[in-house]
Amino acid sequence: MFAIQQLSPLLSLIDESAARGTPMASDAIRGLKEAADQLRTQEQRLVMGQHHHRHGTSTYLFIVAAGASFGEQEFEDHLQEAFEPEREEVLELMSMDEPTVVA
């Protein structure tokens, strides 16, 4: 997943290509332009997930489309190591929409 700001250079190139109106692949360029415009207006939120395990805590950050569901199952699907609740491991999710101090 990417923050919209990270895609700005690519979106600008798509705008320039669409403005030139090149006849080659014009349908593809129009499709890209529509997708770029949609991305620009998409609302996003930041979600922090923490996997507490016997070796400490692993922290993950996710950029999620506003209104999209992102719960423990989605978080578990993205873990780099196995989640073992039988070993008293815990998953914790926090929405970072509002400024929060996290210790």
Image: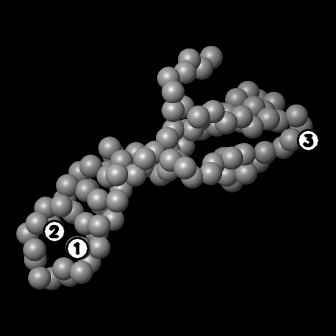
Give the residue at mark 2: 18
34 versus 73 height, above or below: below
Out of 42 and 73, give the one closest to the viewer: 42
Q: Which color mode does the image show?
A: one colour
Q: Which percent across, then down, holds residue 9? A: 23, 51
The mark tally for this picture is 3
| Helix, strand or loop status at disc 2 | helix
Q: Is residue 63 left or right of residue 25?
A: right
Residue occupying image coordinates x 82% and y 36%: 89
Q: Quadrant of residue 30?
A: bottom left
Out of 80 and 27, give the one closest to the viewer: 27
Pointer 1 with pointer 2, Cβ within 8 A = yes
How far apart are the alpha carbons under marks 1 and 2? 6 Å
| Helix, strand or loop status at disc 3 | helix
Check disc 1 and give the amino acid type: Ile
Circle 2 packing at 10 Å, graded few (<14), some (14-19), many (20+), is some
The answer to whether any part of residue 78 appears in the image is no
Pointer 3 with pointer 1, Cβ within 8 A = no
Q: Is residue 39 left or right of residue 52?
A: left
86 versus 56 height, above or below: below
Q: Which percent across, then down, holds residue 52? A: 75, 31
Give the residue at mark 3: 86
Q: Which percent across, then down, holds residue 91? A: 75, 37
Give the residue at mark 1: 29
Circle 1 packing at 10 Å, graded few (<14), some (14-19), many (20+), is some
Residue occupying image coordinates x 60% and y 20%: 102
Check disc 3 and give the amino acid type: Glu
